[in-house]
Image: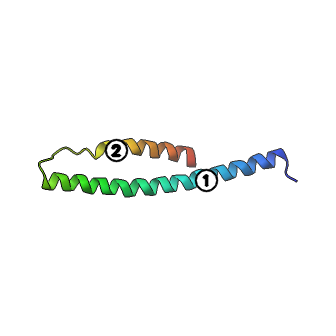
């Protein structure tokens, strides 16, 4: 039979492991989507008259969210 303290420790370990797994998925999706957006922005600048690097905004905005997810999951 588990004591209350053992149960709390087990629950914390499970929650911590799930948050780490969630961060890894989040980071993989971020890398994939940002790569696509960077390529799209570079192609638009190269082949149209666009000259504004708009990709910086989602890169920084989502990067802040990813950093906070890292802070919660690993620290």
Q: How is the image coloured?
A: rainbow
x, y percent for residue 48? 13, 52
- How crowded pointer 2 is (Cα within 10 Å; few <14, some 14-19, many 20+) is rated as few
Residue drawn at the location 38% of the way across and 58% of the way down:
32
- Residue wearing tag 1: 18
Residue lying at the far left of the rendered structure? 49
Q: Quadrant of residue 33?
A: bottom left
Q: Quadrant of residue 47?
A: bottom left
Determine contact: label 1, label 2, CB under 8 Å. no
The image shows residue 66 at horizontal and vertical percentages of 46, 46
Name the residue located 34 percent from the left edge and 53 percent from the top edge: 34
Q: Which residue is mark 2?
A: 58
Pointer 1 or 2: first along the chain = 1
Label 1 crowd (10 A; few <14 / some 14-19 / many >=20): few
Given residues 47 and 4, the one toward you in this image is 47
Locate residue 49, reporting x and y percent.
11, 48
Q: Secondary structure at mark 2?
A: helix
């Amino acid at each position: 039979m588990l004591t209350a303290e053992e149960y709390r420790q087990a629950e914390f370990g499970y929650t911590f492991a799930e948050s780490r797994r969630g961060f890894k998925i989040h980071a993989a999706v971020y890398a994939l989507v940002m790569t696509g957006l960077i390529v799209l922005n570079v192609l638009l600048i190269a082949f149209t008259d666009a000259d504004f690097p708009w990709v910086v905004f989602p890169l920084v905005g989502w990067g802040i969210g990813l950093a906070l997810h890292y802070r919660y999951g690993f620290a």
